[in-house]
Image (cartoon, rainbow, N blue to C red):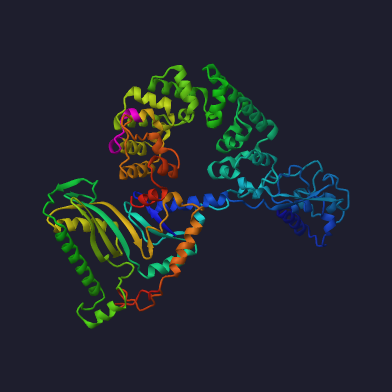
Amino acid sequence: MCLYKPTQISWKQMRNTLAFNISRDINELEQDAPRKYVKIESLTDGTNVDLPAPASYSVTTIPNLADHELVRGPAILADDLRLQPGNLLGFRTAGVVVVGLNKGNRSLHNLNLSRPTSAYHIKSQFGLATDSHWDDGKVWEKTTFIHISRDKLDRMLASIQASNQKKMFEYCGVDPQSQTAYELASKGLLRPAVNGPPLIYGIKCVHFNPPDFTLEIHCVNENEQYMAALIHDLGLSLKTTAVCQQIRCIRYGCFTVDDALLRKHWSLEYLPDHMSHCHTKLRSLPDIGPQLATYDRLQSSQNPPTKS
Amino acid sequence: MLRHSLRFKHVKFLLGYTTIRNQAQCAGKGVVASAVQQNNLPVISFQKPGPHVLDDELRLIPSQEIDNPLVVDSSFEGVTPLFSPSFNLASLVNKSELLQLMVKLGVSIHQWERKTDVHSWVMALDFKKDVQPIIQFLVDQGVASDSLGLFFTKNPYILKSSIEDLEIRINYLHSKKFSSEMISRILSRNPHWLLFSPERIDNRLGFVQQTFHLTGDELRAVATKESRLITSSLQGIKLMNFGFKEEMGFEAHQIKELLLAKPKLWLMNKSMLVDRFDYLHNTMKMDYESVLRFPAVLTCRGFRIKQRHEFLCHLNRAQYDPKLPRYVSPLQIISDSDTYFAVHIARSSIQDFNDFCKTM
């Protein structure tokens, strides 16, 4: 399933809310009646031991109260559900989180092996530098930003993108100018391994209104600190300073913000339809096959060949 | 069952008994009956395998005759624990009348096991002597019989208290001029109240009265409206007062107004409340008077207020000054479903509202 994570919430809180909601809704569904309990009682008076054989027994079937909901507890507990995140967003990052439930964790694992890219929108502002690289941190310095034009920003972003793509080839151990590099690149986007460094495949400015500006980044293996530091470094390279206001994941692989469920919809009323929709989407992905080059495939072939 | 048959077999071995007993002969003496019982419970009328069964056919070894627990006078009933060790109360429910009655009332035995140590003493209670008078007492005081289940789930310890203690506590409340309706509301909403001795309650009521400078009627109103405040931690009340006064900047008479209008605020998490007020006051520019007029605004979850406020800002409809047109009252922000809010207050659609939430 694909959920929209609100900001200022950790994965643990999100997981707990989701698990609690699902188990609460399942427990409210109609439950089976308590099982039967067969009671065999001797009808003779137990103290009279001179009778040679048992006279008679009464056999009654009563509902087994040990099976009653108030006695045994809820039918399903939150811990019974196995929920795994596909991409772990930071505490302050909002956006698309793909979550696997029980058996779905297998398809999630396979999805992750294909190293899907994520797309982020980062709302930032020029003119401020703080300790946490966010706009509510302790302010270190304030600078002017009048000299920044759209043109300068675009050029800087293009150079970042180019250097990242060069790094891609270097991680694969090939010279970017060589034929091997061309062949690898033509087969599909190169991807680093699961625990590799963050790589940016595309970065551009989608909104520019100084001091505010918004960047769209397509990347892999990213994390929140990396992106906040990226904004900070961008500001420095433009001879000013910059901080993040909001980081939002708008896409993870094929799952976009339009597919994501808001927090008020994380319940059994909406989840089944949503999950079948996600399932259909996953099935319709093209089968990439094992030719996709991985980061250390040329170095040590530790990772299994990727497949969707 | 296991215990009985073990003992029987054990005795057989000791006495050199080898003939295979006819099932019918050992039946009906407590062996078969106990074979059917699930847990050897509560076998108060112990049915021992009759000694006559062994006497005629066995020759007992003299030294063992005295030790043999089966060869004793027939008046001795044998010793066995009332209930064998059990993993949970669920295994005892089918045998115990007390537990069955609790289930009928709606008590969650499961919750008892999870949260309390009730299982260690509840089985020793006698229904007619201990439990029934307490149920009668509570119903007389005005606790609704459907809510007795919830009452005992939350506070099983009341089943251990004596009727005299409970009566003293109720008399104390009467002496402080609490009416019967007030008392029944206090008891229904706060099952733990009756566990507090009159001295403790007196202390707490006095503390609340002095801290907020309440008159007698006001104190009674607060205690009735939110009786959990009186049984909660006094330190918490002090901390919350600090929060209101120093961190949020309310004045003493304003704090008293808030207490009388919504005492529930004092049971909430202070830092969350301060954050919420910070957003309301500094970002939404809501002044103290508006918060005092609509204290419910402080009980609404922060993210809901943020979503709705930002949406109104986005549509340029965030107008909170009652003197100007297109005024949106704080109550309208916190109440009703998202659909109602989106359509009637924001004059937009729920789809737009949901899309906007995804950009936050």
Q: Where B61 falls versus A291 (above or below)?
A: above
Residue at the location (36% across, 59% down)?
A88
Q: Quadrant of residue A204?
A: bottom left
Q: Does residue A298 appear anywhere in the picture?
A: no
Q: Residue most toward the bottom?
A: A179
- Quadrant where the image shows the C terminus of chain A: bottom left
The percent coordinates of residue A42 (x first, y second) are 81, 49
Q: Where B285 falls versus B179 (above or below)?
A: below
Left or right of B338 on screen, residue A127:
left
- Quadrant where the image shows the N terminus of chain A: bottom left
The percent coordinates of residue B208 (x first, y second) are 42, 23
Magenta stretch bounds: B281-290
Left or right of A50 on screen, residue B225:
left
Q: Is residue B285 magenta?
A: yes
Q: Quadrant of residue B120?
A: top right
The percent coordinates of residue B13 (x first, y second) are 75, 59
Q: Where A177 falls versus A225 (above or below)?
A: below
Q: Quick one: A45 or B286, which is closer to the camera?
A: B286
Q: Characterize the magenta stretch by its predominant secondary structure.
A: helix
Residue at the location (52% across, 27% down)?
B196
Q: Is residue B44 magenta?
A: no
Residue at the location (28% across, 57% down)?
A121
